[in-house]
Image (tube, helix red, strand yellow):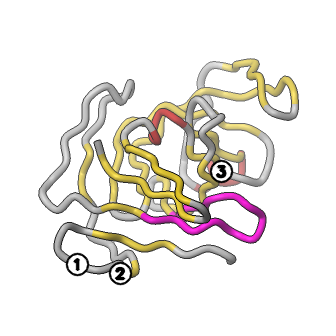
Amino acid sequence: MGFTQKTLDDNSAPQLIESSPIDLDLSSSLGESEANEGNTTLILSRSKDSHFYVDGAINGVPVHFLVDTGASIVTIPTSIAESAGLVAQTENNMKTASGLAKGFQTTIQELEISSYKFNNVTAEIVTGEQALLGMNILDQFDMIQDGDELTLKPK
């Protein structure tokens, strides 16, 4: 797939990510977070297309997210939304890099990226193929880019 993910904790060298979620039980506004012990730092490598990606899941459905600091909120393609049982709520007009687009607000009951779990996440359902990990999730991390690596460390 052209990318790798590693984790760092305070006591070890980089390792491949293993599934042991830290529950960041977040409200729908993502205003508060609470992490269990074992802060894990994610290190994402730039892919061949010059973007950063992270694997995750929405309501248990596997998703390959593009890390998008230009997206205000998580954006989900219709096909993934249907598979994950998401309900389209309010219709919205959105400004995107490609121009104006229509989307439908939804709430993701459980979003996982790597070893992190988020609950009641506001997202937009849109046409397209790529899920975007937007700033309503990325704001929960300190992000440091160093060359071809992007480090995400929980705040």
Residue 44 is a magenta residue: yes
Q: Secondary structure at mark 1?
A: loop
Alpha-carbon distance for marks 1 and 3? 31 Å
Q: Residues within 10 Å of mark 1 (few under 14, many from 20)?
A: few
The stretch in magenta equals 43-55
Of callouts 2 and 3, which one flags the residue occurring earlier in the amino acid sequence? 2
At horizontal 22% and vertical 58% (from top left) the residue drawn is: 39
Q: CA distance from mark 2 to mark 3?
A: 25 Å
As drawn, the label of residue 12 is 1
Q: Is residue 23 magenta?
A: no
* Quadrant assignment for the C terminus: top left
Three-letter amino acid code of the residue under disc 1: Ser
User: In the figure, is residue 23 to the left or right of 73?
Assistant: left
Is 101 or 87 nearer to us in this picture?
101
Q: Tell me the quarter of the picture where residue 4 sits.
A: bottom right
User: Which type of secondary structure does the marked residue at label 2 adopt?
Assistant: strand
Single out the residue that lies furthest toward the left: 37
Amino acid found under the numbered disc labelled 2: Gln
- Tell me which amino acid carries mark 3: Ala
Looking at this view, name the residue that lies furthest to the front: 147
Residue at 24% across / 37% down in the picture?
33
x and y percent of residue 30 in the render?
36, 30
The tag earlier along the polypeptide, 1 or 3, is 1
Vertical order, 84 against 4 (above or below) = above
Q: Which residue is mark 3?
A: 131
**Residue assigned mark 2:** 15
- Residue pictured at 19% horizontal, 67% vertical: 10
From the top left corner, tell me how far across and down residue 90 is, in percent: 62, 19
Q: Which is nearer the eye, 15 or 113?
A: 15
Picture quadrant of residue 149: bottom right
Q: Is residue 109 depicted above or below 100 in this figure?
A: below
